[in-house]
Image (cartoon, grey):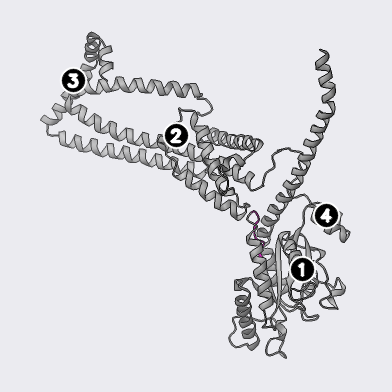
Amino acid sequence: MKTLLQRIEPLRLFALILLGLPTLTVFGLGVLWLWQTGNLLYWVIAMAVFSALSYGLQHWLAWRDRQLLDEIATEPNPDWPPKAEAVWQQVEKLAETCDPKDWPIEDASWILGLGRRTLDTVSQCYYPQAEKPFLELNVPHTLLIIEQASRDLRKDMTENIPFSDRLSIGDMLRLHRWKAKAEQAYNVYRAGRVLINPVNALFGEIWQHLRERSFGMAQSELHRWFLRAYIRKVGYYAIDLYSGRQPVVMDEATKPAMAQTLVSHADLNKIEQTAAAPEEPLRILVLGRTNAGKSSLINALFGKLTTATDILPDTTHTITPFVLQREGLTQALIFDSPGCDSTRFNEKQIHTAALDADLILWVSPANRPDRQTERHCLDALRIFQATQLNRRLPPMLVVMSHIDLLRPASAWQPPYDLSNQQDVKAISIRAALQTVATDLAVPVEQVIPVCLKEGRVYNVNDALWAAILHHQDAALRVRLLRCLDAKKRAEDWALLRRQLISTGRFLWSLPDRLGKSSGE
């Protein structure tokens, strides 16, 4: 300020004071008149009230703008695997703790610095043992993250920030420089106002303080939103790439995510149903112990007998596919399997099948209290699934079969109201539900009591189908991740093949190129 005063000629300063003196005199005389008439206190109160209302309105407008900005915040993808959801929490934490003072917009280095910190946060979660996890990200992935984050951020700014499409970066930098000079000149004016009219200066300073706080709050919120939006966009696409949800090559001609996978294509070929499923079918895996009614369950879902296993129980030697079509259900492949307590049971094969499954139906007989083998197989399956952090766990329903054999075995008069305290059969079914849920460590609402005996099929077309349809959305999300994983593997091989072909062509033509170069 001292330097600025030295640059101003005294005569120019005196001329500026003369220019503003009439206005200041009118204001001073007005205050004097209010004091003489006894209205000065009322004027002060009115000024304080209106100033408070103005400040409150500015504060509310800033809050409203903050709410509008929060509504366009990037949200995590509901189709992400569990590990990605945990990584997103770290990205959110970084966004919440980001201080605008540390990342001034006028300094362009914040783009690379903040983007690098976000990528470090994501890569640290995926490569915790790496010395520099950020370096695990390859160059095409890095370019793709920048491309997608910039595209989305540009769209959000254009649609939600007024005049953002008209204001250039040069304009912003010039405004920043002009702002500093204007503030210096205004400080000189404030100092002179204190000398000429202290009362006016006092109220003016109070109003200026309130106004600066309210407008400064809005500016700070906009700055904070911009930085948080940038962090979330970069983090979102970094998670997408690290979790294998997006290929490096973004080609419109690339096959869709729901295209038929190779494993489903092979399964459909077994039953000559390739043409029936142009898209990837839902894969339902039926598991359980021997003679629990797995094949009978599949027959009941079809509504008719389909294989010899309907008559000869436990003749399933391998995992056998069938096409299941039902109104309201996405076309599905349903797989019969050997009993978990039989000699034909292959744990590794079952785990592989479960990894490719979108919904699991576990069949457990209500009349068999010895469920230790079932629990052991289920626990082994859960441990295996827990290691698949880039996949969602397929929903599982426990189908409690043979409820007609519960006491009293001779009584069978469906339908049964399980809340009926007078019906002995209903009480037995309800008790069996609780026992099965406890023995297999599943929520009781996921246990569906059914009867699969021929001529006594009960609770399949209503309760069981309702439960399957209820879990269909969750199963479709599992299918999406499974298809994306298969698609990425296929595209990685296709990309590698193209790279090797291009390298081979280059090496083949290299002698000719060297010959031409030497000839020249």
Residue position for label 3: 25
Q: Amino acid at mark 2?
A: Trp
C-alpha separation, residue under disc 3 versus residue under disc 4: 91 Å
At x 68% / y 61%, what residue is drawn?
A: 472
Residue position for label 4: 265
Q: Which residues are magenta?
A: 390-396
Q: Position of residue 118 (x, y in %)?
A: 53, 41
C-alpha separation, residue under disc 4 versus residue under disc 1: 23 Å
Q: Quadrant of residue 294?
A: bottom right
Is residue 511 one of those drawn in magenta?
A: no
Judge the density around disc 4: few (<14), some (14-19), many (≥20) Cα neighbours within 10 Å: some
299, above or below 63, in the image: below
- Is 26 on the left or on the right of 334, as rendered? left
Secondary-structure class at tag 3: helix
Q: Nearer the viewer, mark 4 or mark 1?
A: 1
Q: Is residue 55 visible?
A: yes
Q: Earlier in the sequence, mark 3 or mark 2?
A: 3
Seen from the viewer's position, the closer of residues 119 and 307 is 119
Residue position for label 1: 346
Q: Amino acid at mark 4?
A: His
Secondary-structure class at tag 4: helix
Q: Nearer the viewer, mark 3 or mark 4?
A: 4
